Each structure stands twice: as C-alpha cells, then as structure tokens.
Amino acid sequence: MARPSPLEIYALLDKSNCKECGYDTCMAFATDILERKVRVQDCTHLMQDPKQMKNREKLVQLITPPQKAVTVGIGERAVTVGGEEILMRHQLTFYNQTAIFIEIADDDADLEEIVKYLTDLKIERIGDVLRLNGIALRNVSGDINQFKLAAKKIVEISDLPIMLCSFNADILLAAAEEIKDRRPLLYAVTKDTWEQIGKFAIQNNLPVAIASSNLDELVSLSATLQKFGVKDIILDSGTYYGPGNLSVTYDKIMQLRTAAINKEDKNAGWPIMGVPAAYWSQVKIGDDKELWEHQYQEVIMGAIMESIDTNLIVLHTGQKKEEIWALLALMTLRQSVFSDPRIYPAVDPGIYKIGEPDGMAPIFVTSNYRMTKIPVEQDLQGSNLNCWLLVVDTEGIGIESAVAGGQFNAGGIAEAAKEFGAFDKVNHRILVIPGMAARLSGALEDEADAFVVVGPRDSSGIPKFMDTQWKPEEFMKEYASWSKE
Ligand code: SF4
C-alpha cells in the first residue's frame, strides 16, 4: 500500500489553522497524523462540522493501515496489536510490538500467585520498562463453572488484558459474560462456532480470534464475521512443531501478512497470532531431554514469530519466577525488533550527575549512543558511585565504532568538556576515558589540557577500577608537573 503523503491528508482537513487541536497549522497536524501521534478525532472541525463528514470518512479510509489494529483489554494496560503498514521493519517502522500473553490453566492451584507475579513483572532495560501484555486463560478443566470462576478471579487481582481460550463456545461465552467489561479476546472462533461467538462479540463489542490451519477457511471465516458485523478480528493459522513444521508455521504467517500488506486483502488484513505454547500439547515429553531443552524449543518459536512481526504470541514457559530467562530473551529481542529504525539511537550530549559527587569525584567520558550511555549510567548508579558522566556527541554511535570512524575523538571530547563545564564541577582536571578509546589519551591530554586516565573496556569494571586505579591526588601531581613545563 502506498503511504499517503501529508499533502493528501492536508487536502481533507479544514485548513483554517484554528489551533484547537494544539497544532499551529493544519499541515503540522497532517504530518503527525501519519505518525499516529494524533487521531482524526483530535480535529474538532472535522468531527463537529456536518459539512465535513465526507472528508472525515475519506481521511479515515486514507489513513487506515492495510492490517487493522485490534485492542484487547481496557485502561492503561490495554494492548493494541497489528495496525502495520509494512512487511519488513526497515521499510518504515513497526508501530505495535508483539504482545506476549502467558497461558494459565483454569484448574491451576497456583493461579492467583502466578497472575500476581505476571501482573507485577517489570524489567528495566536501556531506558525502557519491559512488561508482559496479557494472560491467556485456558479451559483445561472442561468445567464451565471452573472457567468462570478462574476468569473472575483474574480480573479481581489483575489489570492485564485477558484472552479466554476454549473451543467449546458455551463454556467460552459463559466466562466472557462474566468479564465482558474488561474487553477480553475470545479464542477461538471456528467454522462450527462463528455464528454463536460472532453474535456475542457484536452485542458486546469484543474482539475474537479465528483459528484454522486452512488459510482459505481462515480468510473466509474472516469475511463472514465482518459481514456479520464483528469489528475486531485476530487470525491464528496454527503453530506446528515436529520435522518440517517450523517452516509451515512461518509460511502461513508470512502468507497472511503478505496478503494483507502487499495485496490489501481485507479478509487477511487483521493482526496475526501464534501459540508457541502449543509445543506442550504436540510434542511427547519423555525423559530423553531436560525440561529446559523443551522450554528452549518454545522460546525459539516465540523468537521466530516476533522476528516476523506476529502480532500476539501465547507462551507457556514464563509462568514461574525461575523461568524468567525465557521472558528476558523474548522481551529483549522484541525491544530490538520493534525499535524505530528512523530514530537515531542517541541521547542528548551533556554532563550527567551521578549520586552526590564532591570536588575530587571522577569524570567518566562516554558516547551518546543510547545503548552505551544508559548501561554505563546504570552501572555507575548500581555501584553507588558519586561521579560525573560526560556524554560526547558521537552521532549516536557506540565507542568502538566511533573511535574507528572518528566521531569519538580528542577534539570532540575536549570541546564537550568545555561546552558542558566539566572541570568547573570538580577541583581537578582528570578525565577517565573508556578502555576502547585508549589510543586517544595522548591527543586528548593536549586538546583538553587534562590528565587522561584509561578506564576499563566495559563499564562493569568501573568499581574495580575505582578501588585499584583511581588516585586523583597522584594524577594531579603528575598533571601539575607538565602544565608547569
Ligand atoms: S483543529 Fe483541525 S482545523 Fe484546527 S488547526 Fe487542527 S487540524 Fe486544522
């Protein structure tokens, strides 16, 4: 699908530059609507003036992505999946990252404890807070009351979005009736249950997931449900383990994505989900492998799905605290895949205060590559050091590459020290540079008129460096001997 231009959007706006949306001009609004920073509803003229109704409809059509977005849950933790315009991340950016749901059996004796743990789980990594997105409650008991009870229990103790999972429509809808105000995802609609579940979804404005391993059947059910009036659909073409089945799983997801994005097939144009947790029902778990080896297979499937922008995945591994390794792997990968390739991974250059530095506190120098500055800062904070961090503009490039490419150089560091008043904050003229930039030390001493100490190659070595090598008085004596010369 060709991306509309800001001019095409502008043509449909009121063009009065009334500023009621908070923008100075309609053109600025048009630019940000493309980036999904504002919505059509934010233009009061377009929404309130009946004469502009046609333009409003045209605009909504123009900016609706070929793969529609679907929201599960309500409130702050509601999760929106899909809504993508491109097949490959480098073509633009992905807007909504893969949502990770963890499955729980409705008869699990530890349900409450697991739900609380998953709800509170929070991992901070390079400036982002990584969290899970939902709970997939499976009707393992086969009991309608047990399923209802478990669903009610989850909404009492958690604000995470919920996916209700049962192939028995009566059981599924009984639980959905109990928690419909929380906008659960109904899994799954099949060729036998589309009418019953579809009717309930329409009445309660709920999203549904269709499951079929047959792609023709899947898109045909999607067409039927849309005609019926269902507004939000997610597609599950199946997750298969065993010889050759990984490629089958991959191909089906890619076929659906290609049909939606490249061919603008409206029936395929919905978010896609995968269920790596299917491993546990498809593979015979014998004694020939350790438990982690099985879990590893599930995590690999999850990683493959994330890398091809599968919009929602359901995992089994990750329920328990000792399985955090699985979530760390998938949430870290997700953070990379869904970072915006158009945004420079840079932070603002400057001098950053860590703790309560005194006059002899060290000044560590680093680059303004986000993934260098933030981990260095976290290492310094984690070691309870009181110091300064001088962040030099290296055009968002990490130390090693920036030294090789010349962006991290003696002149630039000296200039940054001067610009940000680094030496005004301390009673010395010592700079600690990263070990990877050791070769700049001589030139930097001249350029910055400072004593340069080569620190560790990795910031995790800073505490040891401080214990064994940080001798500011000695460094200053040496500095004084040259500066007099
Ligand atoms: S509210 Fe609408 S008409 Fe007014 S400036 Fe914004 S986009 Fe333009």
Image: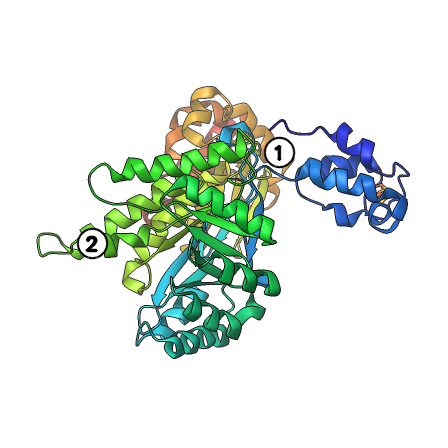
Q: Are marks 1 and 2 in contact (CB under 8 Å)?
A: no
Q: Earlier in the sequence, mark 1 or mark 2?
A: 2
Q: Is label 1 in a helix, a strand or a loop? A: helix
The three-letter code of the residue at mark 1 reads Lys
Residue 411 in percent (x, y) is at: 55, 24
**Label for residue 418?**
1
Residue 284 at x, y percent in the picture: 16, 54
Residue projecting furthest to the top: 405
Residue occupying the point 37% across, 33% down: 435
| Res 277 quadrant in image | bottom left
Measuring from the top left, give residue 288's x and y in whole percent: 8, 52
Please tell me in which quarter of the rendered image ligand 1 is found. Answer: top right
| Disc 2 crowd, CA 10 A, few/some/many (<14, 14-19, 20+) | few
Name the residue beneath numbered marker 2: 292
User: Is residue 385 visible in this depiction of the protein?
Assistant: no
Q: Which amino acid does label 2 sit on?
A: Trp
Image position, residue 112 (x, y; %)? 38, 75
Ligand 1 closer than 8 Å to label 2 CB: no
